[in-house]
């Protein structure tokens, strides 16, 4: 397992270089001149613009810029945004917020998704199963932003249970509604997946053995069925974490949460290349690490998989 | 087989001490499955008894109802679609079909245990064998995890798995087929049940291992004086270990007999066909005999004797009247204990 992990970590280096280069180039060809944008409607002095460009190294060839960027990155320096604030500081403010939101969303996804799926899977073909099917299909077919606005309208504007905008991003109760909206889509998929594996494994031979051993029902289901059924669900949840961060751009926008999604959105709008590259670089790292973690967890859950 | 083995170190008295109540008695058992294509009648009035220390072999093709009967006894039938419209399953004189679910569960595994055919799929792939064996003690006897593990190692030693102590944490896929089947046997044996139902325990194994596993099963059965129901379609396996045989066809018992008599003088054309279809060395080169036709569709069992479309001796009466299980006697009317044949022409079959 240790060697496997080491190999996977080494494999991450070229993936990391590739993705950051890609994002660096994409930011470079974005329309609009970021330096010009600072001045808004005012007509700037061309000499001043040239001066700023030199300062930031924008006058050099793009590959050279990338090289310098990566060199600084190794020293932990993500550069400054155009207002002069270190990108590291911006991220230090935004990442904890999104981390909280994502953790809350994953918790909701797992508890409700697996719960609903198990409930339906144990009653395959009955009314409860059909009910869950209809519910999950509805959720899957509605875009996240529609769901977000509906949820905000009902729970914040009409019922007044929660503030429409998240004021305190450290408060889990305020983050609950956005996290729920963020989790909805994946939750529906988790429910469908759990339902299927439950219904399928319910007929497995080892379930008959567990019954024949005279085990109580809650043990047959809670140990023998659940352990086997969770394997594909864990894989799905793992690969889905990246999706959450993408989804956070929309959800954070709707509920005005000052997280990574919002930071990224604003940076793209103002062509803040250094911020976009910095945020995406960290996201790439996070997703790579989570995927490695999931792969290792997979071996723990399913002993038939052993990494050499 | 009503003697008690005096060397047995089990404190609890077993069936034989309770007079003439058999350990297990199946009475007129019917099982049907409600499917979209109609009602499949899998078991249609099965009767048999098993006593302590006795081995009953239930023989039959796939779909003859032998496994379904076993699952009904264990209480692990899927209900629905399964249904038991009629019949009794008496364990020490008590009908298990009318017991509460919890009372039934306490018999399962503790008093009546089952060995399944394919140990690889019958063992849980993600739990270590030690855990799965220990579970029996933890659930039924409330032992701690540590004690249960010690017991699991003891059990693995019992069924002669080498290096039990090192292998207790291994998973089913890390064992060979024969070893896995030994683990299944160990699991069934864990709480020293009164009765073990073995559903084709050697079908998935190769021939050399088959013999080892059957020997082990027979040895343990003798030692614990257990009743054993051996479900199989392998006539070779049966001859060595069984005391009596019940041959099933289309959900009914068509012939019962003490084991060696059945081989010598079958009293039912179906049994006869089965015996003749065993490949024999002295008939090398000749065509192998096969019973023509296929087993009947259980949703449309033929009227009269279910075997009549395939039977070489079938007459008109076979297509109209269901033959009861006739007691089989000698030509002169001398009694043949334990023998019965559900054939209108049993006399011709055995004596003719």
Image (cartoon, rainbow, N blue to C red):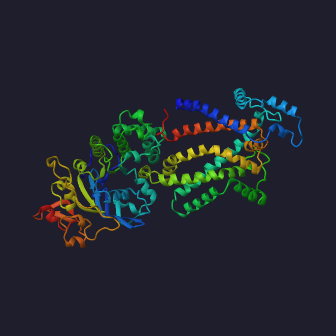
User: Could you say which is closer to the camera, residue B104 or residue B169?
Assistant: B169
The picture places residue B339, in percent across and down from the top left corner, at: 20, 60
The image quadrant of residue A31 is: top right
Q: Residue A48, can we see it?
A: yes
The picture places residue A127, in percent across and down from the top left corner, at: 55, 64
Relative to A12, A274 lies left or right: right
Relative to A36, B213 lies left or right: left
Taking the spot 35% from the left edge, 61% from the top edge, the residue there is B89
The image quadrant of residue B302 is: bottom left
Q: Is residue B344 above or below residue A88?
A: below
The picture places residue A10, in percent across and down from the top left corner, at: 58, 30
Taking the spot 58% from the left edge, 53% from the top edge, the residue there is A191
User: Could you say which is closer to the camera, residue A190 or residue A143?
Assistant: A143
Relative to A279, B338 lies left or right: left
Pick the quarter of the image with the C terminus of chain B: bottom left
Q: Residue A216, can we see it?
A: no
The image quadrant of residue A77 is: top right
Farthest left residue in view: B332
The picture places residue B65, in percent across and down from the top left corner, at: 32, 60
In the rendered picture of this protein, how many numbered marks are placed on residues?
0
Q: Is residue A257 above or below residue B257?
A: above
């Amino acid at each position: 397992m240790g060697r496997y992990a080491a190999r996977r970590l080494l494999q991450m280096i070229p993936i990391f270089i590739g993705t950051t280069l890609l994002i660096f180039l994409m930011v470079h060809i974005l329309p609009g001149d970021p330096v010009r944008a600072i001045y808004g409607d005012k007509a700037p002095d061309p000499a001043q613009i040239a001066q700023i460009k030199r300062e930031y190294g924008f006058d050099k060839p793009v590959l050279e810029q990338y090289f310098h960027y990566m060199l600084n990155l190794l020293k932990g320096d993500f550069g400054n945004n155009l207002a002069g604030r270190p990108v590291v500081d911006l991220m230090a403010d935004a990442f904890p917020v999104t981390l909280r939101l994502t953790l809350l969303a994953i918790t909701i996804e797992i508890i409700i998704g697996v719960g609903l799926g198990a409930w339906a899977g144990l009653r395959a073909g009955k009314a409860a199963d059909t009910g869950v099917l209809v519910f999950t299909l509805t959720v899957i077919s509605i875009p996240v932003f529609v769901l977000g606005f509906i949820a905000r309208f009902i729970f914040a504007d009409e019922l007044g249970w929660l503030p429409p905008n998240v004021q305190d991003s450290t408060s889990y109760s305020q983050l609950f509604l956005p996290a729920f909206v963020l989790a909805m889509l994946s939750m529906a998929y988790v429910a469908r997946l759990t339902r299927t594996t439950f219904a399928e494994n319910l007929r497995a031979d080892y379930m008959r053995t567990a019954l024949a051993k005279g085990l109580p029902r809650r043990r047959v289901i809670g140990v023998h069925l659940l352990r086997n059924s969770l394997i594909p669900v864990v894989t799905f949840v793992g690969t889905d974490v990246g999706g959450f961060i993408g989804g956070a751009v929309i959800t954070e926008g709707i509920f005005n949460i000052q997280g990574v999604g919002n930071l990224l959105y604003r940076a793209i709008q103002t062509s803040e290349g250094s911020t976009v590259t910095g945020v995406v670089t960290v996201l790439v790292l996070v997703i790579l690490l989570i995927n490695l973690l999931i792969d290792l967890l997979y071996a723990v859950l399913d002993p038939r998989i052993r990494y050499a | 087989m009503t003697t008690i083995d005096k060397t047995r170190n089990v404190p609890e008295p077993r069936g034989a001490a309770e007079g003439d109540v058999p350990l297990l008695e199946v009475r007129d058992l019917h099982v049907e499955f409600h499917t979209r294509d109609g009602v499949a009648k899998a078991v249609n009035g099965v009767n048999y008894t098993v006593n302590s220390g006795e081995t009953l072999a239930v023989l039959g093709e796939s779909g003859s109802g032998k496994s379904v009967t076993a699952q009904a006894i264990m209480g692990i039938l899927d209900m629905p679609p399964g249904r038991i419209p009629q019949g009794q399953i008496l364990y020490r004189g008590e009908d298990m079909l009318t017991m509460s679910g919890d009372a039934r569960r306490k018999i399962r595994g503790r008093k009546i245990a089952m060995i399944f055919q394919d140990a690889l799929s019958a063992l849980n792939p993600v739990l270590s064998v030690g855990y799965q064996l220990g579970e029996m003690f933890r659930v039924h006897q409330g032992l701690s995890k540590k004690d249960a593990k010690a017991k699991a190692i003891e059990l693995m030693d019992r069924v002669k798995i080498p290096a039990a102590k090192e292998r207790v944490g291994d998973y089913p896929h890390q064992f060979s087929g024969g070893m896995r089947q030994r683990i299944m046997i160990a699991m069934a044996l864990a709480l020293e049940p009164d009765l073990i139902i073995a559903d084709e325990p050697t079908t998935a194994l190769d021939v050399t291992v088959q013999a080892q596993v059957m020997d082990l099963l027979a040895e343990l059965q003798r030692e614990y004086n257990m009743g054993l129901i051996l479900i199989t379609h392998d006539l070779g396996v049966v001859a060595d270990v069984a005391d009596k045989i019940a041959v099933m066809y289309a959900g009914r018992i068509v012939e019962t007999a003490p084991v060696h008599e059945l081989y010598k003088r079958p009293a039912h054309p179906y049994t006869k066909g089965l015996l003749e279809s065993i490949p024999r060395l002295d008939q090398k080169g000749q065509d192998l005999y096969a019973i023509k036709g296929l087993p009947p569709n259980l949703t449309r069992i033929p009227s009269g004797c279910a075997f009549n479309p395939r039977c070489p001796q079938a007459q008109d009466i076979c297509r109209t009247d269901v033959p009861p299980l006739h007691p089989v006697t000698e030509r002169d009317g001398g009694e043949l204990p334990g023998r019965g044949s559900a054939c209108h022409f049993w006399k011709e079959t055995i004596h003719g």
